[in-house]
Amino acid sequence: AAKSARTVVISGVPDGLLHHEVMADILVIHFQMSKNNGGDVEEVRYPTAEKGVAFITFEDQEVVENVLKKDEHRLEDKRLSRSYPLIVTRYCEHVSAFIIYPVVFPL
């Protein structure tokens, strides 16, 4: 599958608490866990141009579907003082949303 089809957009990543590399690791761990419907992560992009947003590419498109099916993703790690709710969306939809509605969602 194309890379975009295997990629999800993660919003709500706590910003400025930990080094970017550490936060990227925590995200990978979260999205590889079976209890989070996760799977093998090919690539994580964090930080991105948008604050609190990360891109995660899985090796298998099936994992994207499973991750999106999970009702709630909460980022938990001993290095974080509390858990943080994450919003997971498809990468392809996310990109087109910014093209179609640049006025509705100012960046």
Image: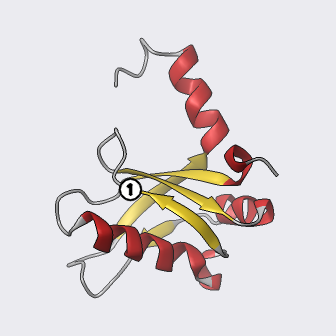
Name above or below for residue 88 compared with residue 40.
Answer: above
Q: Is residue 31 above or below residue 8?
A: below
* Rendered location of residue 60, percent (x, y): 77, 65
Q: Classify the position of the C terminus by image quarter.
A: top left
Q: Count the labels in the image.
A: 1
Q: Position of residue 88 (x, y in %)?
A: 54, 54
Label 1 Cα crowd, 10 Å radius (few <14 / some 14-19 / many 20+): many
Badge 1 element: loop
> In the image as oriented, which residue stretches furthest toward the bottom?
78
Query: Is 70 left, or right, of 79 in this rendering?
Result: right
Q: Is residue 66 left or right of residue 33?
A: right
Q: Is residue 62 visible?
A: yes
Given the image, on which type of amino acid does mark 1 rest? Tyr
Residue 98 position in % (x across, y down)? 51, 23
Where residue 56 sits, quadrant-wise, is bottom right
- Please say whether residue 75 is visible from this viewpoint: no
At a point 57% along the width and 35% down the height, the residue shown is 94
Dividing the picture into quarters, in which one does residue 58 lie? bottom right
Q: Is residue 49 left or right of residue 17?
A: right
Circle 1 sits on which residue? 46
Residue 21 falls in which quadrant of the image?
bottom left
**Colouring scheme applied when the structure was drawn:** secondary structure
Residue at position x 33%, y 83% in the image: 77
Q: Camera-side residue: 53 or 42?
A: 42
